[in-house]
Image: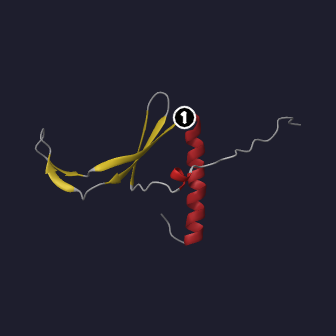
Amino acid sequence: MNDEPESHLEVSISAEVEAGIYANFASVWHTRDGFVLDFAVITRPPQLTGDPQSGQRILSVPTRIVSRIRLPPSQVFELMKALEQQLTAYEKETGHKV
C-alpha cells in the first residue's frame, strides 16, 4: 500500500498570460541542460534574396520570437504525451487530421 498522498497541482494564471500570444512558427533545440522551444511570428512576407557568401538564391522569412520556453529533459516526454493526447482529441472532435 502506498502511504504517499496523491499530488494535485493548483495552477493559476495571470490576466496578462491568460490571453496567450499568437505564434505561427516554432523552433525546438537543445543544450546539455534542457530543451528550448522558441515560438515566433512571421513579421513580413517571405522574400527571395541572395546569399552574400554563396550567391545562391534563398527565401528569407523574417520572424520575431514572441516566447521562449526552457524545459528540463525530464519534462519533454510528458509534453510529447500531452500533445499527442490533445491532438487525438482535436481530430476526434473536429474530424480534421492535422
Q: Picture quarter containing residue 37?
A: top left
Residue drawn at x 33%, y 48% as measured from the top left? 64
Residue 22 image offset from top left, x and y in percent: 43, 56
Residue drawn at x 63%, y 48% as measured from the top left? 12
Report the residue that reaches farthest toward the top: 32
Q: Picture quarter containing residue 48?
A: bottom left
- Label 1 neighbour load within 10 Å: few <14, some 14-19, many 20+: some
Viewer-side residue, 86 vs 18: 18
Viewer-side residue, 33 vs 7: 7
Horizontally, residue 81 falls left or right of residue 46, namely right
Per the image, the residue denoted by label 1 is 73
Q: Disc 1 marks which amino acid?
A: Pro
Residue 41, relative to residue 34: is it above or below?
Answer: below
Residue 38, relative to residue 25: is it above or below?
Answer: above
Label count reads 1
Report the residue that reaches farthest toward the right: 1
Residue 63 image offset from top left, x and y in percent: 30, 50
Residue 14, relative to residue 98: is it above or below?
Answer: above
The N terminus lies in quadrant: top right
Residue drawn at x 48%, y 36% as measured from the top left? 35
